[in-house]
Amino acid sequence: MCCRWSAMSSKPPFLLALALCLSGCGYYGADGGGARAVPVHKMQKLKMYEIAGSSRPWTLDAKSAELKDGEDTVRMEEPLAVYAHGASTSTVKSRQGRFNMEDSTAVFSKNAIAFTDGGRIKLETEELKYSPKSDRAWSDVKVDITRVKDGSTTTVSAQKGFYNLARKDGALSGNVVAHELRDNVTLETEQLNYSEKNALMWSDKPVKMTEIRENSPTVVTASSGSYDLNGRTAVFSGDVVALEQKDNVELYTDRLVYNHQTALLSSESPVRMKTVRDNSVSTVTARKGSYDAAGRSAVFTGNVVARSEKDKTMLETEKLFYSAKRALIYTDEAVRLTGDSTVVRGRGFEAKPDLSEISVMNQETELPKK
């Protein structure tokens, strides 16, 4: 036998209707542990839905539920909610849950899972809270987000976070780790913001990015950074250090753009490259530069200065190329090479990165004045 019970909230526009299908015709229980027994409505196959007055309609189903007399909170087993946001919907489910009849806020606990953006974004946590008024879902415990779109999978984990199901944006904080599987990129920070509209992740906190390409890791650290999921491009700002571990190359600059499709790290800001080979350290500084992580090569432009820390030899030119594969730096531009007692000028130059085994083409030598 089925009974039907309907109720409305006291605060429009959140007008609710509850349809209760019971195994009997319904009964009252008693709350154990108190001096006075409290009637409890026990229900099976609960269905709640909005009947009027809001631009954000929703439905909420549960396998079973309880509502104590005098309270506004319905306790549920296996709740399943569907929330509408214009033309799109989001689904939230869990093993247990609570629903506040006054403000329509729901709490999904024990293996809470939310799907949005046509199922392309999944959020998992042990307790998820949701408010239809703000379209905001949030969790104060560990949360994992998976985004599958355009052939790419991105996962993000954090200690807590929130996500606006309508705007499709949010923020995560506490040991945040984002992994983009297509480019094998991992981004680590303490706080990460996300916008699905712009397909962008960004952080104003210190960030660390690691990319593994052909078993060779490239690591970038900076004061802040962002990652464009569609453009597959990262931008780093403030105290940027990029380390290419295979060739022991370090890049230092204030702003660095990393295009993961072309494996190119580029900076329009002053840049410094440091290389270590056979315990010999050399540096290159320039107004701007780029490093090809796949080709293991670099190009520097504008006031280029290369130095060997071993013998203090210095090279000056306007453009310089570096090849880790060939273990060479070279240029076709005019050069000025300064040693301990001589200055050599020429056009065209080739040497080891530590400025050993030097060849200067079309050279002119300036001897020291007596």
Image (cartoon, helix red, strand yellow):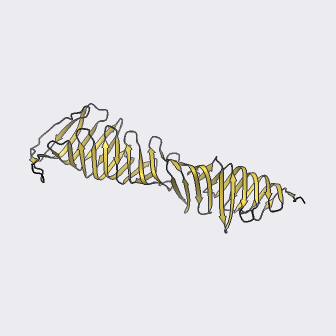
Query: Among all residues in the image, which is located at the extreme bottom?
Result: 278
> In the picture provided, is 15 more to the left or to the right than 338?
left
Residue 178: x %, y % from top left = 45, 53
Query: Is residue 131 or residue 64 the one in the foreground?
Result: 131
Image quadrant where one finds the C terminus: bottom right
Left or right, residue 161 beside residue 109: right
Q: Measuring 26% from the left and 38% from the top, which residue is drawn there?
A: 103
Q: Which of the two residues, 198 or 312, is positioned nearer the viewer here?
A: 312
Residue 214 visible in image: no
Compared across the picture, whether 336 is left or right of 234 comes to: right
Q: Position of residue 77 (x, y in %)?
A: 21, 50
For residue 74, what is the image quadrant?
top left
Residue at image x 28%, y 51%?
Answer: 109
Q: Is residue 233 visible?
A: yes
Can you say which quadrant of the picture contains the N terminus? Answer: top left
Q: At 14% across and 38% down in the image, what residue appears?
A: 5
Give 49 or 176, whichever is nearer the viewer: 176
Badge count: 0
Residue 18 is situated, as x and y percent measured from the top left of the image, at: 19, 39
Rendered location of residue 226, percent (x, y): 51, 47
325 to 264, vertically: above or below: below
